[in-house]
Amino acid sequence: MKIVALSDTHSRHRLLKLPKGDVLLHAGDVSYHGDKREIEDFLQWFGQLPFAFKIFIAGNHDFFFEREKLSAIKKMLPPTVHYLMDEEVSINGIKIWGSPYTPKFYRWAFNKQRGEPLAEQWKKIPADVDILLTHGPVYGILDLTPNEQHAGDKDLLREVLCIKPKAHVCGHIHESYGMVKRHGIKFINACILNEAYELVHKPILFEV
């Protein structure tokens, strides 16, 4: 299965050129301001893309998804689009689970305190997940900020190393774009924009 991963498009999605693949994953921050108009434009674009399956989660900019009821959001989705909110979807036997939460930082959307609140959140991840999709990275892997601080979550790292999915796809930390393999897991930070919100990175293609 060929999978194309991207994240943090911040309403710049119509400028992208995507490689061919079977599944498209978006790891959140589809919008910049998080308003309904931005979300509707993203969903229209996302739904028309030539992928058999299109899956996304929200990010800390995507306030619309935090405010709206999940049932109302589901009604907005194009037929081939899956929105995951602490949910799993199975694609040809490959189990994909997604969540938007990141460690609390100012007053962004889908923020939870580090420690017990996030640790409890990550316990929801199924033990048999093949691809984990979260907006934020694990601690110490593709999570360095410009001031050389690790912004990832230690409890998420602990859970991922316990579960050992085939791949963990995230975004959030624009300056740590890339893909590495650690502990037998493909870790992918698929941020399309850099820290200056310039469109400089390419979607990441990988196989499962």
Image (cartoon, rainbow, N blue to C red):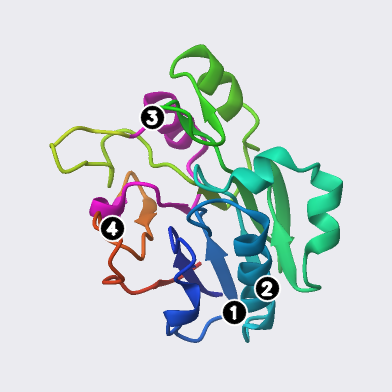
- Whichever of labels 2 and 4 marks the residue nearer the N terminus, that label is 2
- Whichever of labels 4 and 1 marks the residue nearer the N terminus, that label is 1
Question: Closer to the camera, 71 or 54?
Answer: 71
Question: What SS does tag 4 mark?
Answer: loop
Packing grade of label 2 (10 A; few <14, some 14-19, many >=20) is some
Question: Closer to the camera, 104 or 120?
Answer: 104
Q: Are marks 3 and 2 in contact (CB under 8 Å)?
A: no
Residue under label 3: 153
For image coordinates 34% across by 34% down, the residue present is 152
Cα distance, mark 2 to mark 4? 23 Å
For image coordinates 59% across by 79% down, the residue present is 22
Q: Position of residue 1 (x, y in %)?
A: 56, 75
Question: What SS does tag 1 mark?
Answer: loop
Residue under label 2: 53
Find the magenta span and give its range: 152-181
Amino acid type at circle 1 is Asp
Q: Position of residue 87 (x, y in %)?
A: 71, 45
Amino acid type at circle 2 is Phe
Packing grade of label 1 (10 A; few <14, some 14-19, many >=20) is some
Q: Are marks 1 and 2 in contact (CB under 8 Å)?
A: yes
Amino acid type at circle 4 is Tyr
Cα distance, mark 3 to mark 1? 30 Å
Cα distance, mark 3 to mark 4? 17 Å
Q: Name the front one of labels 4 and 1.
A: 4
Q: Position of residue 144 (x, y in %)?
A: 21, 41
Residue under label 1: 22
- Whichever of labels 3 and 4 marks the residue nearer the N terminus, that label is 3
Cα distance, mark 4 to mark 1? 22 Å
- Label drawn at residue 171: none
- Whichever of labels 3 and 1 marks the residue nearer the N terminus, that label is 1
In the rendered structure, the answer to whether residue 202 lies left or right of residue 148 reads: right
Q: Name the front one of labels 2 and 4.
A: 4
